[in-house]
Image (spheres, rainbow, N blue to C red):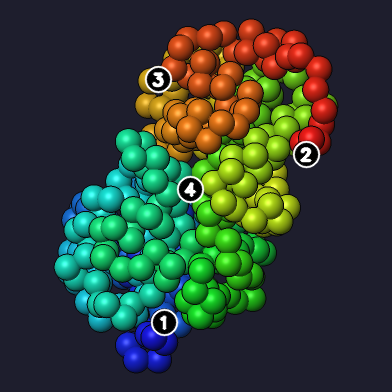
Amino acid sequence: MTDSTAILPRKAAVLVAGSWGTALAAVLADNGWETALWTRNAEHAGAMNRERRNHRYLSGIELPEALRATSDMAEALRGASLALFAAPSAAMREVARAAAPHLDEKALVVHATKGFEADSLKRMSEVLAEELGRPRSGIVVLSGPSHAEEVALRQPTTVVVASEDARAAEQAQDAFMNGYFRVYTNPDVVGTEVSGAIKNIIALGAGLSDGLGFGDNAKAALITRGLAEISRLGTAMGANPLTFAGLAGVGDLVVTCTSKHSRNWRAGAMLAEGIGLEEVLKRMGMVVEGVRTTKAAHVLSGQYGVEMPITEQLYRVLFQGKDPRSAVEALMGRDRTWELERL
């Protein structure tokens, strides 16, 4: 892959201006990149530039001076040597399609979205490759245990960037890494994307467990057996099993299942209170990727012939009206089995 950052100026475009996109845009700006943060709404862009805050999604965090918001896609991407896509999974194809005519062919493409496309069940790197008309092998995935709120406060955070193209991964590593944001590289794109998507399902379950008043024993078991489900599906899809023991796997799973910042955990806790799914999503006010991912993973588990009992029970709670406590009883009452996969 061409070393685009040596040819084009250190300008980055970040699409879109949600909490995660804003936090990562701030990292790039801190690292000396002229950073354009794109939002659909002109008023939103204007407010961020005037007030140096993204009150809508990341209130209270001052934006670096090198970061400017815009609602003009062409302006955001003009001259950019790095394009970071942080749109929700449901909007990724639309955003990528709009960006394609304005994106320099030499620009490095990174995405930081954790989910599958609902209809096609494709991973985000596959969606971007299709819409941007470039090889999937050169697209970089940024993932790992990283809440936007903590990154924006410059608290120590460690993530992974994955790409089949080692040079592309190293370019992303150089662009994002600094004193508070440590970045490792990994060639396993499939494992990194599957881990980032499925852990949101398990976090919904962790919120349900806590909301029902179960203790640490239950949550520890849920996290551990959730990792088994992630690994089972990921390896069936072609991932390296070692990825699930790393930052994108167990690291992201633990932080999403245990943190007050986790949208998926909060959504699960509200479901445990008997609040309906539509009302939960309305109250959250932001995308809860685990809900869409549960539906996608339910289908994928059938396609790949892998057993995912936690995902199955959460699917029934979310989309078939099953009582959460009955779902836990169903998990506890399953037939006896081995902990480790038998050969």
Vertical placement of residue 298 versus 163, above or below? above
Q: Position of residue 291 (x, y in %)?
A: 46, 30
Say whether disc 4 or disc 2 marks the residue closer to the N-terminus. Answer: 4
Vertical placement of residue 301 versus 211, above or below? below
Say whether disc 3 or disc 1 marks the residue closer to the N-terminus. Answer: 1
Residue indicated by mark 3: 279
**Tag in front: 3 or 2:** 2
3D distance between C-alphas at marks 2 and 1: 39 Å
Secondary structure type for disc 3:
helix
Find out whether the residues at labels 3 and 4 contact each other: C-beta distance under 8 Å: no
The local crowd at label 2, few if under 14, some if 14 to 19, many if 20 or more residues have their Cα within 10 Å, is few
Q: Amino acid at mark 2?
A: Leu
Q: Amino acid at mark 3?
A: Glu
The circle drawn on residue 1 is 1
Say whether disc 3 or disc 4 marks the residue closer to the N-terminus. Answer: 4
Say whether disc 2 or disc 1 marks the residue closer to the N-terminus. Answer: 1
Residue indicated by mark 2: 343
Find out whether the residues at labels 4 and 2 contact each other: C-beta distance under 8 Å: no
Q: Amino acid at mark 1?
A: Met
Vertical placement of residue 216 versus 243, above or below? above
3D distance between C-alphas at marks 1 and 4: 25 Å
Q: Nearer the viewer, residue 177 or 293?
A: 293
Which of the 4 image quarters holds residue 130?
bottom left
3D distance between C-alphas at marks 3 and 4: 23 Å
The circle drawn on residue 114 is 4
The local crowd at label 1, few if under 14, some if 14 to 19, many if 20 or more residues have their Cα within 10 Å, is few
The structure residue drawn at horizontal position 62% and vertical position 28%, both measured from the top left corner, is 307
